[in-house]
Image: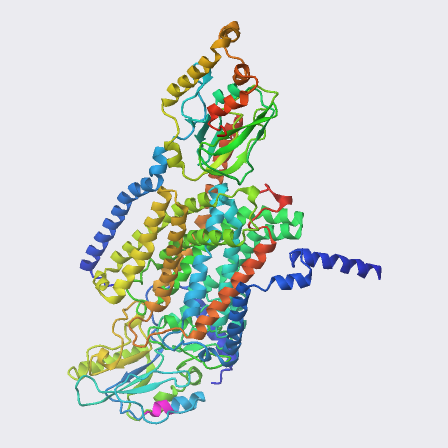
Amino acid sequence: MMPHDLHAMYSAKAIEYLIAVAFLLLFVPFWSLLNGGPAARRVKVAKRALVPRLVEWFNVPENVYYHPGHAWARVEPDGYVRVGMDDFARKLVGPLAGLRLPAPGTRVEQSEPGWALLADDRAIDMLSPVDGIVVETNAEAFRSDRPPDPYGRDWLLKIKPEKLIANLKTLIVNGTERRWMELNADTLRLRLSPNLGLLYQDGGAPVDGLARTIDPENWDELAREYFLTSEE
Amino acid sequence: MAETLTRTATIRPWVTEKILMGLPPRAYARSLVTPGNAIVALILLVGLPIIVCRFVFGLASVTNLSQTTPWGLWIGLDVLCGVALAAGGYVLASTVYLFGLKHYYPVLRPAILTGFLGYLFVVIGLMADLGQPWRISYPVIRSYGVTSVMFLVGWHVILYLTVQFLEFCPAVFEWLGCSRVRRWAASLTIGATVFGVILSTLHQSALGALFLLAPTKLHPLWYSPFVPVFFFISSIAGGLSMVIVESAVSHRIFRNQVDPEQHVDLDRITLGLGQAASVVLFTYFFLKLLGLADGNRWDLLATPLGAWFLVEVLGFVLLPCFLFAHAVRRRNARLARAAAVVSVAGIVLNRLNVSIVAFNWNVAERYVPSWMEIVVSITIITIGVQTFRWIVNRMPVLREHPDYAGTH
Amino acid sequence: MDLSRRTFFKIAGVASATAVAGQPAVATASPDVRAVLVDTTRCIGCRACEAACAEANGLPGPVGEPAVNTRRVTDPRTFTVVSTLVPNGDAETRFVKTQCMHCVDPSCASACLVRALEKTPEGPVIYHPELCLGCRYCMVACPFDGPKYEYDRAIPYVRKCEFCAERQAAGQPPACVSVCPSGALRFGTRAELLDEARTRIYQNPDRYVHRVYGEHEVGGTSWLYLADRPFEELGFRADLGETPYPAYTWPFLSAVPLVLTLWPPFLMGLYAFTRTRESAADAEDSGEEVRHG
């Protein structure tokens, strides 16, 4: 039974207050422990606005993860990954007849074909930048009646990631994308040089559908080279 | 003549669609023959006669209850644990409707159903334990023992069953296709949620308060004036953990029910619930420490029962707390599910400790439930699970009814 | 005086309703409450009280000789028992009669959710079998394990000594007291008997332990005991404390109306707050302004 003598009560109450204070002190680090973690720290979450940044002729915004096959990935605040093709890819291929996107529920793997671009009766695969399950596809991507917005309105897939940290480690980000895009532009310029006159007639901006301009017969092979989806 | 014809013509297809899940009677009967159902049938075959025996020959013929141990497994497990683990209903309802976290909606209906069925089968378990169960309505209609905590428990359970039923009604009316009634039922949701939280606070804590009247019978490490608060807070953790476990099991077993188009992100929901459970368990641990300090019997920790108390508090409260935290940090849903299992076990352990192990701790003859008591408990739980299965297979619980999608 | 059963219950009902309406934190016994003083030094272990009790209640009487040196317990068919004890190396045997203690503030009566157990103002804690549902909470609550349950019956009831409430209403002492040959049992008002007990202790300070068991235990009981050995040696619980057990639940029961009053505004406030935040976020997304009326 509880003793109600003053001595016992003093020590009991003192210990109670100490425990309550300890709880308050420990609660703050516990809360941050719960909400922190490697996942939260290492992943750059997409902010609302994408600031366009031109590298050579191509828009390569910051805070976007790029795959060497010219797909991009952005981590959304709700944990999903939004994926699409970058401006280089879009300008390379030009106007699309359609897209072959995987159905929701399909599993995609990083650096394995994820979707296909359709133009001129040819299908060009592109590699997925992350591993995961497709949860949503953009039916409105690259509609012909409006200007293309490859990083915004014309996103392609929303993916639930499976190995996000590992995947992101292999993608191009944090300034490296600038150099990478410069290299891409250089190789393209070399191919274009025989037709240099055609290209720079109006002052510098390339024609939409660069691949078709360079090699009208086998433009899809050229695109696949850059997208790393050539059939060997 | 023509009228009766049309009536039967509409009843038969209704039964086939709603009850037999679209199968002709013979095909439905054949579909029932599965190994799982065979086990259920076996359990019922053994359990139901025992229940009959209990009513014909009295409690002594089936239980090990004694004059010093008036409450046994049926109270400790079916009633106390059942109520604590059915707490998912009010916790998830608050999460979705009061805290506005709509992305938990996919697990809300199963949680409410678990809550409703949980309490229903608590009452059924209680009816097996009561000496004269046909008098169970007396505290409501005949005589009001307002000084009794048990009176409160009784009233709250009855009111709460009603509230949970009302919260589940929209699903029933969607199944039956009565959209007007369904709209009326849905309009009651916020009121039902608030009322449900109030009732739950009271009866979860009241079950703990029952033991306030037994200071010399309950071991000092478990007896505390805070025991109502302990029961209430642990019921929140129990509810959250139970929803994690139940949703994981349901999504596996009722895979055909879950709509792939809906792309329910169960992992994300699990981790979110796990995060909340971690905080609650952390708080609960410190509450238990405060209880220890208030009781001022630290010397008892050195006894065997003291060691058992430490096992309960360190192994089944603090451990799952950290497992959840780790799982949330690493975004590891599988670890969160494991932590949930440990947490559920901890709640069960606590309720059994308070009602059986630490109760009458200083009496020489220990109570051990008889095999028949165990079988009856299993039978009641099995019937509860079967009811859950029956409802989930027919009503829009794990999926959205196509006619009412998006109207939440 | 010939009280009909119904009148008795009516009076008892009104009386207990008024008793319950008050909120005793400490048991206050009316001095006129009936009680019994059990002087264990005078008990010769004849067990006439057991036989009289059985006869008065229609129970089978005591059978055979009881085991020596075990504290016997009552059961559903034996409302009182006399234990034969040989305490701690003492040659002399002691006889201790036990039964329901008819506490001043009984935990069983406060525990009963249908008021099947009722403390009458005269003293006895009586049982209303027509109300009892058999939840057995009274058994959990009683520190003396007074109420016993008929587990072996299809229609079971709680059974315990009812202090011969009907005999008392008719002006007679309880059956056990009326047959006690040695004067170990004495019936009277609690105040009288406490005086008597204290007098006996004062007059024979070496004979008695200086304590009346039941005077303060759990707020006081109607059955009071005197002994010449420490009460623990005679099987009495000494760790029960002086607070009546119902006082332990009172803080919780008082909190209930507070929860019923405070939770609704708190929860609805939370709901309103969440809703405003949601509509503000939605409006922000769609570029609208949010008006607060």
Q: Residue at x 55, y 19 (%)?
A: A94
- Residue C291 x, y percent position in the rendering: 52, 28
Viewer-nearest residue: A79 or C206 = A79
Q: Residue at x 36, y 32 (%)?
A: A169
Residue C244 seen: no
Which span of residues is magenta-colored? Answer: C47-51
Magenta run includes residue C48: yes
Q: Residue furthest left?
A: C206
- Residue B155 x, y percent position in the rendering: 49, 61
User: As displayed, is residue B139 above or below residue C189?
Assistant: above
Viewer-nearest residue: A176 or C227 = A176
Q: Viewed as shown, does residue B169 lie left or right of A82?
A: right
Q: Viewed as shown, does residue B262 lie left or right of B320?
A: right
Magenta run includes residue A112: no
Q: Main secondary structure of the magenta part?
A: helix
Q: Viewed as shown, does residue C254 lie left or right of B133?
A: left
Viewer-nearest residue: C26 or C151 = C151
Q: Residue at x 44, y 57 (%)?
A: B85
